[in-house]
Amino acid sequence: MSVITILSNKQMILSLIYNEQNISRLVRRQNTEISFRCMAYDTHRFTNLVIMIVTPT
């Protein structure tokens, strides 16, 4: 094996590891965003329900 092949293999391994870290960070951020959106939606629905119950029609 030449030195260039060894270096390119190390770079490829490092780039794969770096990509996995970026993807996992992205997935965690997306999961957090989805959970916040669900909480906001549930709060909105609950607020509307309370307003409908309290407000006489």
Image: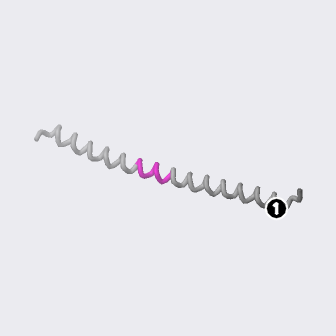
Image quadrant occupied by the N terminus: top left
Side of 42 relative to 47 (left or right): left
The span picked out in magenta is 22-29
Q: Can you tell which quarter of the image residue 11 is in?
A: top left
Q: Position of residue 14 (x, y in %)?
A: 29, 47
Q: Is residue 8 magenta?
A: no
Q: Position of residue 3 (x, y in %)?
A: 15, 40
**Depth order, front residue of 7/17:** 17
Q: Secondary structure at mark 1?
A: helix
Q: Is residue 28 magenta?
A: yes
Q: Residue at x 69, y 58 (%)?
A: 43
Is the magenta region chiefly helix, strand or loop?
helix
Colouring of the image? one colour
Side of 31 relative to 47 (left or right): left
Give the residue number, with chain letter if any, for mark 1.
53
Q: Is residue 7 above or below residue 50?
A: above
Side of 3 relative to 30 (left or right): left
